[in-house]
Amino acid sequence: MLSERYQRPSPVAADAMSMFGPVERCKQVVRAYIDAGVRHFVINPTCPPGDVERQLTILAEQVLPGRA
């Protein structure tokens, strides 16, 4: 999926252009962006359509609580 979307090999695209992995890792990625001055994020799930709601719920409830 990422290879097609970004026209780059998946590992390169995944590391450079996305947030993935356990909740704690995602929190670290968000914190690093905030510390660098980012104030707005674009959320574009790359999971299968049937998994989007679950992924967004995890993001809202576990990764970004208090940041909205």
Image: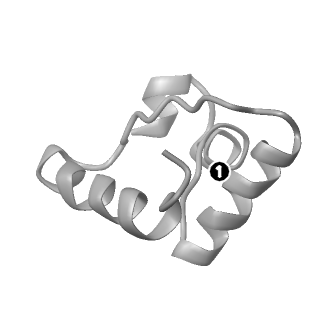
Q: Where is residue 29 in the image (x, y as percent from the top left)?
A: 71, 56
Report the side of 14 relative to 1 (left or right).
right
- Quadrant housing residue 21: bottom right
Query: Is disc 1 surrounded by few (<14), some (14 to 19) or many (20+) residues within 10 Å?
Result: few
Q: Where is residue 64 in the image (x, y as percent from the top left)?
A: 51, 58
Decide: is 58 above or below 4: below
User: How many marks on residues?
Assistant: 1
Decide: is 42 above or below 46: above
Which quarter shows the N terminus?
top left
For the residue pair 7 and 25, the one nearer the viewer reads as 25
In this view, the residue farthest toward the left is 50
Q: Which residue is drawn at 51% across and 64% down?
A: 63
Q: Residue at x 67, y 53 (%)?
A: 30
Report the side of 59 relative to 26 (left or right).
left
For the residue pair 16 and 30, the one nearer the viewer reads as 30
Q: Where is residue 36 in the image (x, y as percent from the top left)?
A: 88, 40
In this view, the residue farthest toward the right is 36
Decide: is 17 above or below 35: above
Q: Which residue is drawn at 59% across and 44% down?
A: 18
Decide: is 59 above or below 52: below
- Quadrant housing residue 12: top right
Q: Which residue is drawn at 65% across and 71% down?
A: 25
Report the side of 40 relative to 44 (left or right).
right
Residue carrying label 1 = 11
The colour mode here is one colour
Q: Of helix, strand and loop, which one carries label 1?
A: helix
Q: Where is residue 2 in the image (x, y as percent from the top left)?
A: 48, 38
Three-letter residue code for mark 1? Pro
